[in-house]
Image (cartoon, rainbow, N blue to C red):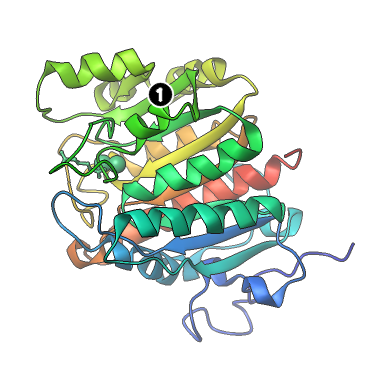
Amino acid sequence: MSAPIGPTDSSRVPRFAGPATFARLPRLDQVDHAGIAVVGVPFDTGVSYRPGARFGPSSIREASRLLRPYNPGLDVSPFAEVQVADGGDIAVNPFSIGDAVETIQEAATGFARAGTRLVTLGGDHTIALPLLRALHAQHGPIAMLHFDAHLDTWDTYFGEPYTHGTPFRRAVEEGILDTEAISHVGTRGPLYGKKDLEDDRRFGFGIVTSADVMRKGVDEITDALRQRIGNRPLYVSVDIDVLDPAHAPGTGTPEAGGLTSRELLEILRGLSSCNLVGADVVEVAPAYDHAQITATAASHVAYDLVSVLALNKGA
Ligand SMILES: N=C(N)NCCCC(=O)O
Ligand SMILES: [Zn+2]
Ligand SMILES: [Zn+2]
């Protein structure tokens, strides 16, 4: 098999020239087959507060122009290991959440059947449910690490079951997740009541709060998470609001007291031996961003997730 087509060489074509694909990678239609695709889902009809995550994918792609091909944090050149391509955006209906959820599931199922693993750029957190459904059909129950200020295991908003605050309650109800190995990381902030935590525990989630990360440190936290996951198929969902608003102001439901981007990236790198089967980076809303702070963080998160997938060729 021929070597993967890599990103446009920034020493020949300035990185600020031309249309933005993720990390200046080829588009999916420019390669025979991609083992990994970065795909956008410009959908934000599921939000409960500030809208704008529909512009997340394009803002992350813009910020990703500066990424370079070698990842020293993981000692890997991800784009040389596997063909990685930008799969463009899934064209979702902004006026119907149900229709959008179906479209996302169909598109993700198509990628799974083609043997292409996804790092999905949201979009609001609603999109995690159809992405998980598609992976469940392929792998059975999935272990999950959910990086987020919020639990996202609430029941409904205004009677609506598919929203950005409810995807993981639906996923547990549908039997999609391996409830022996699911955990929130970076949780913090006010809740509606103590019952939120009781419900969440009943569903099987472990919680590593943002204060836990500060007190115990990244290595101890990551060891414990790795042990819980073992070699189960793992999905990683990163809501960018897991970061402190100082590190990610451009998001719809910011909460004070979050992780630093350094902590988040180090925890993700600590998952390099795990059997990662898919990941998302959601809730980037560039209208509230400044100087691409959030989009830059999200582009690095996506890059490290692609790197972990590239290291785990055994999928
Ligand atoms: N998934 C995110 N970002 N936020 C959920 C917030 C739900 C609420 O309005 O209480
Ligand atoms: Zn959140
Ligand atoms: Zn969320």
What residue is rendered at 19% in x and 60% in y? 51
Q: Is residue 202 visible?
A: yes
* Residue 221 screen position, x and y as percent: 43, 20
Amino acid type at image mark 1: Ser
Which quadrant holds residue 30? bottom right
* Quadrant of the image containing the C terminus: top right
Callout 1 crowding tier (Cα within 10 Å): few <14, some 14–19, many ≥20: many
* Residue 108 screen position, x and y as percent: 55, 53
Q: Is residue 138 left or right of residue 271?
A: right
State whether residue 182 is above or below residue 54: above
* Quadrant of the image containing the N terminus: bottom right
Image quadrant of ligand 1 equals top left
What residue is rendered at 38% in x and 22% in y? 217
State whether residue 88 is above or below residue 262: below
Q: Is residue 175 left or right of residue 282?
A: right
Which quadrant holds residue 3? bottom right
Circle 1 SS class: strand
Q: Is residue 233 left or right of residue 251?
A: right
Q: Is residue 295 left or right of residue 191?
A: right
Q: Which residue is mark 1?
A: 183
Q: Is mark 1 within 8 Å of ligand 3?
A: no
Q: Is residue 265 visible?
A: no
* Residue 2 screen position, x and y as percent: 87, 66
Residue nearest the viewer, comparing 291 with 237 = 237
What residue is rendered at 35% in x and 28% in y? 185
Which quadrant holds residue 32? bottom right
Residue nearest the viewer, comparing 58 with 132 = 132
